[in-house]
């Protein structure tokens, strides 16, 4: 969270209550432990409804005072509006965005670690950085989603760094979207003539220091990340934001720690002029892969096998199919608004499947995201085998499992799953 704010930023968090473990700033979400703190806010591990663990980011700044403008939380809120409806396998999923007493809370999936943690772990074992093949496998996934954001949606993340590249089951997911900007919108506060927050100074593309965003801005940051994670060193030695800004703008990067094959590739991605860089992030990573020895790059299959589920889950011991009246059709229609009976706050749109254990519905979450909700209605839901199935699923997925009420003929369990649509 070590970013630079514009001159209009207002620090108001000193008057807001300090969060403590055990607190529930959002009803049903209990804070467990701090994952990180910075000048812009803090991140907590929290326990969500259904016993699942999530990450909760809390932003400093009072959103009830938006007329003052320029607060860190306001900037993050605006960025979240751009990304909250986007879904991609390599984007860290956001579950909930709430404003509570003027403070912005963002609940997202809980990652295993980030690449900054991975670098620290490797260095503690005596290595200078990550193994090259492993690193390129990670960056290939990061490049894929960055290109998707750029080409399909005209967006630049603008805060690519090791701490924002998260690992989930051996795959990278890009997170922390607080500085994301559209290439179509102005990048300066024209009314005040002040430059807005751009990016973390250490990884700032030169053009952003002038209030300009290019389609290749994230590529510059990704190249710095590659150098740092591979070698454990950084191409610029500035120790503060001013020194780093001058070096990004005027000084050639120090690339002696790289192999001779890597140097020209990274140098191109770090070109001061965006048009001299690779056309896409994926082209940059592919160039590194093509110049490599080829035998140190793990195949995608190696990662797929780790998390592949080929063993079917055990089935319920119920051998009877509930009659239609036991399948609980949600009370609300799209016109009637969110359901208060089966899954409060969720708007049920369309039933996409029925079976002996229940139904699957397309639903609209409280924050507007489309999801799938599986409603299990079974007279013997209390059977140990059924509980074991859900307990196993909860340990291996991010799906929320709740048991809001007992219904006609049996218990109801509603599980919200990411929509494939």
Image (cartoon, helix red, strand yellow):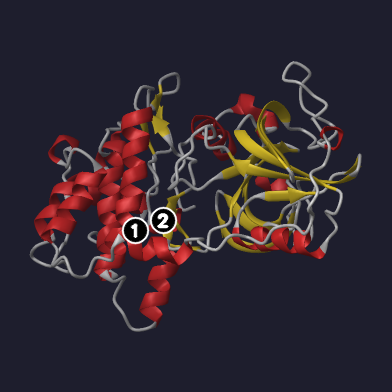
Q: Quadrant of residue 153?
A: top left
Find the residue positioned furthest to the front: 319
Q: Nearer the viewer, residue 321 or 345?
A: 321
In the picture provided, is 331 more to the left or to the right than 287?
right
Disc number placed over residue 34 in the picture, else none: none
x 34%, y 61%: residue: 301
In the image, residue 202 sits, relative to residue 105, either above or below, namely below
Find the residue positioned furthest to the top: 335
The residue labelled by disc 1 is 138
x 48%, y 42%: residue: 177
x 25%, y 67%: residue: 132
Mark 1 and mark 2: Cα distance apart in space: 6 Å
Q: Position of residue 214 (x, y in %)?
A: 27, 33
Q: Position of residue 410 (x, y in %)?
A: 88, 46
Q: Quadrant of residue 35?
A: bottom right
**Residue 287 appears in the picture as rendered:** yes
Task: State if disc 2 and disc 1 touch (CB < 8 Å).
Answer: yes
In the image, residue 13 sits, relative to residue 67, either above or below, namely below
The residue labelled by disc 2 is 172
């Amino acid at each position: 969270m070590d970013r630079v704010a514009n001159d209009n930023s207002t620090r108001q968090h000193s008057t807001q209550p300090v969060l403590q473990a055990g607190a529930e700033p959002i009803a049903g979400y209990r804070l467990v432990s701090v994952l990180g703190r910075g000048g812009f806010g803090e991140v907590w591990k929290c326990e969500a409804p259904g016993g699942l663990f999530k990450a909760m980011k809390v932003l400093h700044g009072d959103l009830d005072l938006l007329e003052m403008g320029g607060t860190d939380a306001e900037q993050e809120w605006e960025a979240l509006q751009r990304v909250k409806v986007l879904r991609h396998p390599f984007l860290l999923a956001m579950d909930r965005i709430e404003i509570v007493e003027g403070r912005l809370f963002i609940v997202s999936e809980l990652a295993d670690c980030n690449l900054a943690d991975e670098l620290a772990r490797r260095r503690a074992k005596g290595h200078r950085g990550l193994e090259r093949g492993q690193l390129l496998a990670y960056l290939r996934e990061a490049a894929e989603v960055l290109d998707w954001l750029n080409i399909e949606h005209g967006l630049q993340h603008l805060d690519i760094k090791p701490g924002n590249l998260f690992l989930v089951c051996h795959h990278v997911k890009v997170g922390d979207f607080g500085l994301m900007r559209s290439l179509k919108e102005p990048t300066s506060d024209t009314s005040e003539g002040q430059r807005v927050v751009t990016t973390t100074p250490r990884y700032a593309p030169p053009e952003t220091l002038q209030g300009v965003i290019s389609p290749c801005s994230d590529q510059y940051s990704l190249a710095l990340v590659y150098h740092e994670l591979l070698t454990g060193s950084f191409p610029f030695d500035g120790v503060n934001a001013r020194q780093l800004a001058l070096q990004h703008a005027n000084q050639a990067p120090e690339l002696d720690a790289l192999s001779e094959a890597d140097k020209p590739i990274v140098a191109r991605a770090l070109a001061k002029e965006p048009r001299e860089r690779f056309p896409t992030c994926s082209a940059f990573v592919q160039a590194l892969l093509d110049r490599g020895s080829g035998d140190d790059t793990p195949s995608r299959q190696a990662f797929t096998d780790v998390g592949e589920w080929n063993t079917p889950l055990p089935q319920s011991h119920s051998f009877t199919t509930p009659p239609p009246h036991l399948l609980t059709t949600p009370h609300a229609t799209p016109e009637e608004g969110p359901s208060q009976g089966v899954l409060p706050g969720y708007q049920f749109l369309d039933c996409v499947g029925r079976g002996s254990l229940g139904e699957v519905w397309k639903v609209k979450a409280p924050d507007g995201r489309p999801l799938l909700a599986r409603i299990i209605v079974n007279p013997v839901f209390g059977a140990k085998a059924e509980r074991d199935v859900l307990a196993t699923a909860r340990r291996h997925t991010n799906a929320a499992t709740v048991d809001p009420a007992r219904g006609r003929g049996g218990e109801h369990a509603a599980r919200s799953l990411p929509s494939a649509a």
